[in-house]
Image (cartoon, helix red, strand yellow):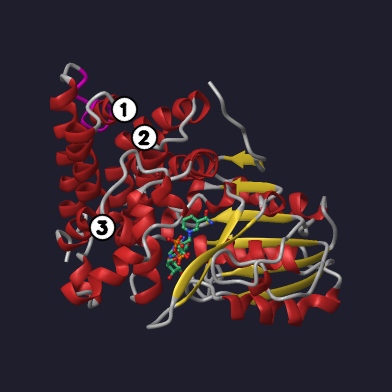
Amino acid sequence: MNFNVAPLPQIRFGGGRLAELPDVTRAWGCRVLLITGARAFRATPAWQTLTEALADCHLHDMVVDGEPSPQLVDAAVARFRDANIDVVVGIGGGSVLDAAKAIAGLLPFGNSVLDHLEGVGRGLPYTGPALPFIAVPTTAGTGSEATRNAVLSVQGEQGYKKSFRHDTLVPRVALVDPELLHSCPPARIAANGMDALTQLLESFVSTRASPFTDALARDALQRVARGFEAAWRGGDSEDAARGREAMAYGALISGITLAQAGLGSVHGLASPLGAYFPIPHGEACGTLVAAATHANIRLLHTREPDSIALHKYAEAGRILSGQHGLSDEEAQDALVAKLHAWTEMMDIPRLGNFGITEQDIPRIVADSRGNSMQTNPIVMTDDEIAQLVRSRL
Ligand code: NAD
């Protein structure tokens, strides 16, 4: 055993806990920057309740619509730099949380996030400290509420999708209220759920997995297995509420395990896919996870048949299929079958639906070897990665 546990936020989890946000916020100060998405949360009575409860504070607010760019972060830092903000609160999906995380990181300094963005930035070290940041997720997918990175992207021919990363960017508080998922349409629950599931599975079989992350991932996979379909069907039943709770928990834990153990080929590919094409992150993960899991298992059997990852895939197969008496090979098949079945049932779109063609494969492959690909349980050749992408066009 040889592992580190990186910083974690204070975690407040449970239905209805959004009500605690005003007091949790005040504990950090009264000059508040509140960052939300454009519609979902602001359309609920909870928005009015929250702004009324903070009415005696200096409340600044901004909207993040779509996956955030470095330019959005820089503009927000310039806009709020003189407001002497005490605490940043982000309420939204991964896009809002990542934007808020990066803004909290740079408000004390006022420089451009491009100074620090991995791979494309100026490579200047960032040492923090960031402003206190409270993360309130309204999707169950990215786990950004528990991670130390903010993903920023520019989309198009010269596009990129890269992280601004540092321990001090970890939110001080992750306030996770599963009831916020109630307004998510089934397609969002599906794509985000596949993202969380992918993060759990990839960190479970990662070359950097530890007993600590394994214990968390194993239990969260069990909860996701039981709750995913009910959350996706939605509605007001107790079953649906329990499903949303399971998915919110699974996403939170996936953020913890990914931050500690790393990811794999699906997230390696999600970066160039999201940079060059208008494919949301959840859909990119969801469309690839079954095929990527199948490819990893097949390649491990051929090249590294003694790999511990094969046993872990089998374990995940027993958990997700609920068939606990299966042999390792049967359980690996059951895992791939279950992932394919969910992909079909939940209608996760193929890569071709986003305009991706055979001609695009070489540059997608060339840009897929970032951090995540480094912890895939088997090293894949360019041809093998290309075949994986091709199978989902
Ligand atoms: P998102 O934040 O882009 O939201 C997707 C859509 O869902 C938006 O239209 C949003 O308005 C809507 N929405 C959000 N909450 C809703 C609700 N409760 N009801 C109805 N609609 C709602 O999507 P996401 O998948 O949560 O986040 C994606 C971003 O997170 C990407 O940029 C991705 O790269 C990043 N990411 C970050 C990390 C990390 O560790 N920092 C990890 C994985 C992904």
Query: Given the image, on which type of amino acid does mark 1 rest?
Result: Lys
Q: Is residue 277 magenta?
A: no
How far across and how far down the image is residue 131, in percent?
78, 59
SS category of the residue bearing label 3? helix
User: What is the magenta range?
Assistant: 318-324
Q: Look at mark 3 in the image and give the residue it sits on.
A: 382
Q: In this picture, is 196 found above or below 45?
A: above
Between discs 3 and 1, the one toward the N terminus = 1
Between discs 1 and 2, the one toward the N terminus = 2
Tell me, yes or no, whether the two marked residues, 3 and 1, touch with CB atoms within 8 Å: no
Q: Look at mark 2 in the image and give the residue it sits on.
A: 205
How far across and how far down the image is residue 153, in percent?
49, 72
Asked which quadrant contains residue 115, the reply is: bottom right
Between discs 2 and 3, the one toward the N terminus = 2
Which residue lies at the image location 15% right of the left edge and 46% below the top edge? 341
Q: In this picture, is 78 found above or below 194?
A: below
Tell me, yes or no, whether the two marked residues, 1 and 2, touch with CB atoms within 8 Å: yes
Q: Look at mark 1 in the image and give the residue it sits on.
A: 312
